[in-house]
Amino acid sequence: MKKIMKITISIAIMVSMLAGCAMAPKAENTTAEDGSTLRAAETEGQDKNTESDFKSAWPRTYVDGLGKEVVIEKEPQRIVVLHFGYTEYLLALDVVPVGVASLSITQQFKTLNQYEELSNITDVGETVTPNLEKILELQPDLIIAGVGIHDDMRESLEKIAPVVFKKNYGQWDETLQDYAQILGREEKAEQYIESTKEIIAQTRRELEKYSDKTFVFLRPASKSEFGIVGSKVYSHYHDSQDGFGMNVPESYPESWIEISLEALTEMNPDYIFLQDKEELCRQKVAEMESSSVWNSITAVKEGNIGYLDISLNTGSPLAIRLASEQILEHLK
């Protein structure tokens, strides 16, 4: 139970960051001077970072999420990330960090099953309280921290290596571009964005046959409640132009909230997807089976309940690709 609570708290932090703001193909590796294998990073946009900065050679100046100008002298080779949710963006850009906070959580992600390099990454402690000694031992040349999580640690972290604070824009492509700017992987980011958008468009075409149906995306909460993933939190599910185009009920919220079973019944969706650890989701559904209110929902009556991997909560391009795969597989 204690372990589940830790995971829940970490995921909650990640979802709140995304609200405020699939599988990736194997790619070429970069080898550091010490022989360690690396990949790339995450990205978001900001007006202060001009196009000339975006394409500049090293060194480059990057304005981070706290508004500080950080000079990055050369392409980072040994990167420590202090939130597990950032890992997927780095891997999408072909960069493997040397250290990740709450690494055990990422090791459960189906988005990362293909990356054998995860076994070479060091866990640097909890997301909220990373271990400075472990970070120092890794001799990083860049640390990526989270706004609102590690602000008070900046001075301590800067004694170890240059620190950039991730921006919270929320859009996966902006986020990927921003990481690419930090890591000098702009071209790789553009290629990955283009191929991901092709997957999104193909998914939208395949889902056109469900244009008269409504979908809700839930997570287990308290006994009689669910967490509902708002339509603006993961817009790639619902956007009719740039997403999968999956319709939601009229009363569906835009942001992340908890709703009662009665409120879910009023929405009466045609399909329900639970997006969390599958064990917890199935346990939640089993608890609901004796409820006449639960059984009155169209999705429940017609057996239209699907289970999506917990890694999809990152909203990363890897998560989008896996979401396409899992949603289409369920609907088939």
Image: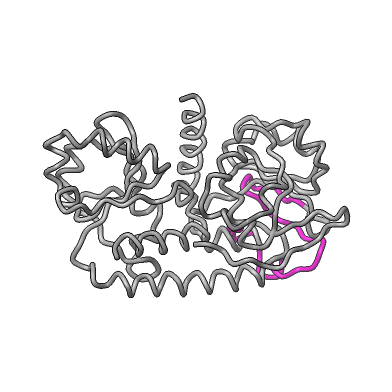
Question: Which residue is pictured at 33% across the width and 34% down the height?
Answer: 221
Q: Position of residue 151 (x, y in %)?
A: 64, 35
Q: Is residue 303 visible?
A: yes
Q: Is residue 21 visible?
A: no
Q: Position of residue 33 (x, y in %)?
A: 88, 56
- Check the image and name the residue furthest to the top: 2
Q: Nearer the viewer, residue 52 or 59?
A: 59
Q: Is residue 61 magenta?
A: yes
Q: Quadrant of residue 237?
A: bottom left
Q: Nearer the viewer, residue 289 or 191?
A: 289
Q: Position of residue 191 (x, y in %)?
A: 60, 73
Question: Which residue is pictured at 61% across the width and 50% down the height?
Answer: 87
In the rendered view, tell whether residue 124 sits above or below residue 236. above
- Check the image and name the residue furthest to the right: 33
Q: Is residue 2 magenta?
A: no
* Overall secondary structure of the magenta section: loop
Specify how the rendered protein is coloured: one colour
Extent of the magenta region? 42-70
In the rendered view, tell whether residue 219 sits above or below residue 183. above
| Image quadrant in which the C terminus is located | bottom left
Residue 16 shown left or right of residue 266 in the figure: right
Q: How many numbered marks have been drawn onto this rendered protein structure?
A: 0
Question: Which residue is pictured at 16% across the width and 37% down the height?
Answer: 262
Residue 62 shown left or right of residue 138 in the figure: left
Residue 195 shown left or right of residue 43 in the figure: left
Q: Position of residue 281 (x, y in %)?
A: 35, 40
Q: Quadrant of residue 72?
A: bottom right
Question: Which residue is pictured at 31% across the width and 29% down the height?
Answer: 222
